[in-house]
Amino acid sequence: MLSLIKCEFVKLKRRKIIYAVFLSAMLFPAGLSLLLKMPRFAGRYGSPAELYDELYISSVGFGIQFLLPVVLGILSSVLFFTERDNDTFKALRTVPVTSRQLVLAKIGVLMISSVLYAFVTHLTIAIFGSMFFTYNDCPGYALLTLCNGIFIAMGTLPLVILNVTVARTYVFSVLLTIFYTVLSFFIIPLYPVVPKIVYQIVPITTTTFWTAGILGKIGKVNLELYGAELRDAIPSTLNMCIYMAIVGTVSAIVMVKLYERWEN
């Protein structure tokens, strides 16, 4: 399995896309640092520590919860379209690699890439936050960023299924990915008026609410300002882990079945 994952990373490295993934992880932390440094924005906060907190919260919200699904959607298109575009399914039959192993290797690449993306984002926040404001990285920030990387990767797997079944070109795949992400963010502010099941079944939306709950627990967000509806929308960490495990497992099974059908 490790050899297969290494081979998949070699494919991405050959196409230079892996470098774009990590560069995109620096985009929002760097840009938001410059934006928050401007007097018109900096004057809204009482101290450099508050500016650092705002940099972290905004970078996770835009850089991981918004941009990362798009990045993973594009990455998955490259990973899962390779065999189809090069017509190498028949060649795979000559080597001792099953559809299950191949799919799990590709999912492993997505998971590793997502975690590394989250790590680079957190590191960039720490560097730029220390340069422009002050280092105010509480112990929970690093773990929260890592969990966001894992949950977003799991939550993007249903999108991967849509990409490999509906999308026939890379352009359509990118458009589908952007639509999925924008729709997820469009649902978030509607939590007081839409049925609870609507935002609970969308993985990215659920991740956003869970993150807000954790930030509230560590004292970085005042949830009381948003009313009881927001508190009701926040899932527990246990429920979040169970839900994402179910999403990931079901998505993996479906993708294995799809690959088996394509091979035949």
Image (cartoon, helix red, strand yellow):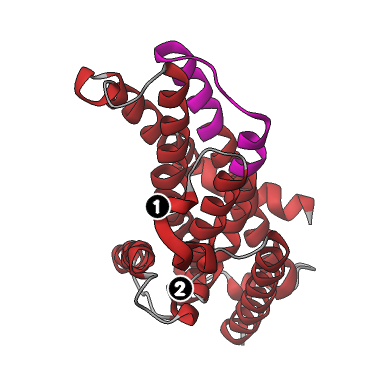
Secondary structure of residue under mark 1: helix
Residue at 49% over, 57% down? 208
Q: Is residue 130 left or right of residue 147?
A: left
Amino acid type assigned to the residue bearing label 1 in the image: Phe
Instruction: Indicate the position of residue 204 as horizontal and vertical percent values.
Output: 48, 62
Magenta residues, start to end: 121-145
Residue 215 painted magenta: no
Q: Is residue 1 left or right of residue 27?
A: right
Q: Which circle marks residue 66 in the picture?
A: 1
* Location of residue 17 by image quarter: top left
**Quadrant of the image occupied by residue 256:** bottom right
The percent coordinates of residue 123 (x first, y second) are: 55, 26
The percent coordinates of residue 64 (x first, y second) are 47, 46
Examine the rendered structure and indicate whether residue 247 appears above or below residue 56: below
Kindly identify which residue carries mark 2: 199
Quadrant (top left, top right, bottom left, bottom right) of the N terminus = bottom right
| As drawn, 237 above or below 13 | below
Residue ID at (46%, 50%): 68
What amino acid does circle 2 point to?
Tyr
Residue 100 image offset from top left, x and y in percent: 73, 73
